[in-house]
Amino acid sequence: MKPFLMSVEDVFRLRQGRIVMPTGRIERGRVRAGDEVEIVGPGVGTTARVVDIDAGGVSIGEAGAGMNVGVLLRGTAADAVERGHVLAAPGSISAHTRFTADITLLPEEQGGADVVSGDRVRVQTRSAAVWGTVTLHGVDVVRPLHGAEATVTLEHPVALEEGRPFAFRHHGRAAGSGTVPGSRAEPHASRSRPSRPLPSPLTPATAPPGARGIVGAGRR
């Protein structure tokens, strides 16, 4: 069975703040009351114990992939949870500040615009949204309806893994998408090959504790 993972969509404080309930849809795996889960995202990287699981106001002892639930957590670590974090089986996913992927731009009439190295884009994956800077490989510019390989350096760490799709906004509009590769793909025949080795697809986060960059912390 795949390890548990749930993206945090919203956060509620219960019992005068003693219990924190992140809510969202379980992407994979299962979680049970009593399990330890890791909180992955900016400013965190620790575990908390699951006190209970809520499904539409009903307490259940276990939940699995595809279910929309609230996971009740207790402790100081739980108090750091916010929208854009993920809850996961400990050690199964980590936060990253840099990744390499093939990006594809939308048509101009749908928001696509030229992207050059150094441009800042708003990267969106799961419930997280964070600014990043693009570095293109082998080309000077990517035009609407075209694609290229690029490294994106994020301002704050985000839970990422190989094979994860993402979208991005540029100049305030939906602009394109991509996928973090599970293995390095050969460059498109229509663009030149880089003259030097490229970085690993994912670079672990080294942001200092307390860094925060995900938009929205949920309702309190």
Image (cartoon, rainbow, N blue to C red):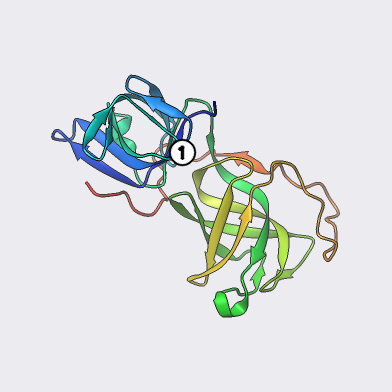
- Image quadrant assignment for residue 14: top left
Q: Give residue 185's position: percent from left, percent from top.
A: 78, 49
Q: Which residue is mark 1?
A: 208
Q: Nearer the viewer, residue 23 or 198?
A: 23
Q: Residue furthest top?
A: 34
Q: Give residue 157's position: percent from left, percent from top.
A: 50, 44
Q: Nearer the viewer, residue 127 or 151?
A: 127
Q: Give residue 28's position: percent from left, percent from top.
A: 49, 35
Q: Give residue 165's position: percent from left, percent from top.
A: 58, 51
Q: Quadrant of the N terminus?
A: top right
Residue type, numbered disc 1: Pro
For mark 1, does the 10 Å Cα neighbourhood hold few (<14), some (14 to 19), or many (20 or more) residues?
A: few
Q: Which residue is at a point 55% across and 58% down the rendered structure image?
A: 167
* Figure check: 57 above or below 49: below
Q: Residue furthest bottom?
A: 109
Q: Which residue is at a point 31% across and 24% down the rendered structure image?
A: 61
- Image quadrant assignment for residue 82: top left
* Figure check: 115 above or below 59: below
Q: Secondary structure at mark 1?
A: loop
Q: Which residue is at a point 39% across and 22% down the rendered structure image?
A: 36
